[in-house]
Every structure is written in C-alpha cells, then in structure tokens.
Image (spheres, grey):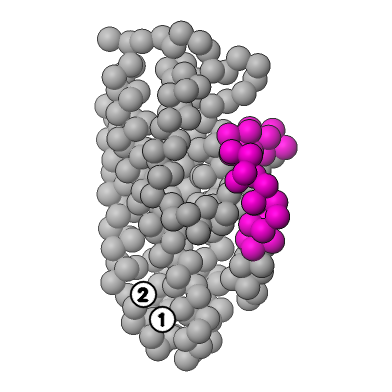
Amino acid sequence: MTMTRPDPAGAGGTCLASDMVLVHKVFRRELRMLPPLVAAVEPGHVERAALLGKHYRELATALRHHHRAERDLLWGRLAERTQLAPALEERMRQGHRRHDDLLGELDGMLDLWVTVADPDVRDLLVDILTELAGHVIAHLEMIETRVLPEVDRYFTQREWLTLGLRAASWIPLNRMAWMLGAMLEDATDAERRNLMGKVPAPARLLYKMVGQEQYAREMRELRAAA
C-alpha cells in the first residue's frame, strides 16, 4: 500500500532532503582528504597520527550512525508507504555491510598506528581508507539518485524534521558546532539558508560568535599537511 503525502514538501522549490545531501558532502570531502593526510604523516610523528586518528574515529562514528538512521528511519519509512525495488534495497544493504567490514579493519589497526606512527601500518591504513572512500562515495551517489527523490513525495516537513532530529541525537553537544560547520563548508546559498532555518536562534548565534571560528581553526590544524 502506498501513501501520498498531504502537503507536498517540495512546494516552493525546497527539497526536504537537502540537509541529508549536506551530510553526504561532509562524508565525501573528509573521506577523500583523509588518505593523503595519513600518507603524509612521518614515521614516529605520534602527535600528528593521534590527531588524524581522532578525526577518523569521529567520521567512523558519524558514518555508522548515519547508516543506522538511513536503514531504520529512511528506508523503513519509505517501505511503509511505497515499494523500494528489492534489487536496490539489496545493493544498499550490501554497501553498508562492506563499509562495516572496512571500518572494522581500520578500527583494528588504528590504535597501533597512533601509538608508534609506524610507516608500514600507515601505508596499509591509507589503502583501506582509499577503498572505504570509494565505496562510500558510490553508495551516497546511489542514495541521492535513487532514494532521496522519494522523500518529497512521501514525507511531510514535520516528519522529515523529526527524523533529522532523531538521526542527529547521538552527536555530543560539544561537537554540534563542528558538525554544523562541516555541513556548511560546501553548502550552496540555498542549502545554507535551508539548514540555518532549521537551527534554533540561540544555536545560530552561538555558532556565529564561537563555533564558526572554532571549526575553521580545527580544520586548519587538521589539514595542515594537505
């Protein structure tokens, strides 16, 4: 059984899923940048290795939570209202399983690398990070072309906002400014307006006063070798 939405969310040219596209932009950008940053770490430079290791762990945590929200809140809700092609759903699930396998491999080696910054471990990490980036980017493109267009047909604005809040509920308060800065970095003007329109006024003010510079400073340090 399918259900058409009572109030078209795409009215006025606004795509509900634009905020998820911004999250995808964060994953694309950061996963592409991480392999060359790791490759540039000199043997024994454990402080630099620890900084990049911390960044990887945040990305890995974010990706795992994003996939869980995608499965439970996006695919699950769409399955109640329309019918996803079985072959498409299987491809998406296979993608998640492959990502989980690669993340598990990285998790298993990361502690060793950040402790001694061994070049052989570093090179293996670079190979796996590069493979992960390729798989994730291909998966995100599939989601954007095959799944997200259905959001404006089958979700109301209120439902999508509720889903987004639940999907982001895992983010620690002290990293909210980082996530907002990361989403805004490559946003178009329309995407920026749409996202900031959903952020409560006190949080917008705090981001402009403190968070924006904090994000820029952190990224300068992280990307110093790029």
Question: What x and y, as percent, mark residue 51?
Answer: 50, 75
Q: Nearer the viewer, residue 113 or 204?
A: 204
Q: Nearer the viewer, residue 34 or 191?
A: 191
Quadrant location of the N terminus in the rendered image: top left
Tell me: residue 212, above or below residue 25: below
The main secondary structure of the magenta stretch is helix
Residue 151 visible, this angle: no
Residue lying at the far front in this picture: please name it.
202
Quarter-of-image position of residue 124 = bottom left
**Which stretch is magenta?**
189-215
Quarter-of-image position of residue 66 = top left
The secondary structure type at the circle numbered 2 is helix
Question: What x and y, as percent, mark residue 209?
Answer: 70, 55
Quadrant location of the C terminus in the rendered image: bottom right
Name the residue that disc number 1 marks.
114
Residue lying at the far bottom in this picture: please name it.
44
Q: Which mark is residue 110?
A: 2
Image position of 189 (left or right of 157): right
Tag 2–tag 1 contact (CB < 8 Å): yes
